[in-house]
Image: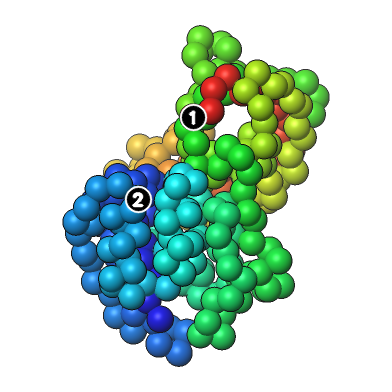
Amino acid sequence: MRIAVTYDNGNIFQHFGHTEFFKVYEIEDGRIAGARVIGSGGSGHGALAELLQGEGIHVLICGGIGGGAQAALAERGIELCAGQSGDADNAVLAYLRGELISSGANCDHHHGEGHSCGSGGCGSCHSGGKNTGKTCRVHYRGYFNDGTQFDSSYDRGEPLEFICGAGQMIEGFDRAVENMDVGQEIDIHLLPAQAYGEYDPDAVFTVELARMPGAEQLAPGEQVYLQDQHGRPFPALVTARDENTVTFDLNHQMAGKELNFHILLVEAE
């Protein structure tokens, strides 16, 4: 079995039709047996679909993708798991564990290699809506349950632009926009699981200052960037510091919160 991922410097490239590289994974016995990076070689979704077919690809993992590309892949029997983002290797591992939810329309409900899409079978595959894969522009206001506003595109004077279903927005917001009509306004209420997730106490950790030169200058409430084992930066909030240690919280500042949005779809193309 072979899985291809739209690829850019370790991460999933977000625009299928413009990807310059694919990372191709060889899967044996439900595990990654090898991987290589190939150039896209052509332009347009038809050429890319032909390339993947020629490489013997069974599954494509990508970010944003249009309806024409979905159809071209389906014609060639290539399963689609769209709407993904982040680390390419981790996405493939998540697919093999049955944890990916596709925003595309072509999960064929048969994954081979003993794999089913999601722990409950492919019934968990999300087929997306009429705006999935389109570039959408929306005006919105976001507010907490007590009515306090935390964000507004109106205050910035321009709509928010994103590719619907590409994983660029929180899940509940994406799902709300995918079936909206241009000019339509809606109000939505999101639980943490549909927004930034539940607060994870295990994402809070303390480090000795002696192991982190310069950390003695940090102050509680300060937002900093740390590095993982691959040298990639990730945000963290300083929550405490004393003469010997500093404590970081990796939770998103909105983790564990219920959110509300008023959304106006300005454009979808």
Q: Residue at x 74, y 25 (%)?
A: 186
Q: Which residue is mark 1?
A: 269
| Label of residue 8 in the image | none
Total marks in image: 2
State the residue in front, 138 or 189: 138
Above or below, 4 against 136 in this view is: below
Q: Return the x and y of residue 260 as percentages of the image width and height.
A: 73, 30
Judged left or right of residue 199, residue 34 is: left
Alpha carbon distance from label 1 to label 2: 17 Å
Q: Dot 2: few (<14), some (14–19), or many (≥20) neighbours within 10 Å?
A: many
Q: Return the x and y of residue 66 as percentages of the image width and height.
A: 46, 44
Judged left or right of residue 181, residue 71 is: left
| Label of residue 45 in the image | 2
Judged left or right of residue 188, residue 175 is: left
Q: Earlier in the sequence, mark 1 or mark 2?
A: 2
Q: Mark 1 is on which residue type?
A: Glu
Q: Quadrant of the N terminus?
A: bottom left
State the residue in front, 105 or 35: 105
Q: Return the x and y of residue 95 as percentages of the image width and height.
A: 51, 70
Q: Return the x and y of residue 164 as percentages of the image width and height.
A: 53, 39
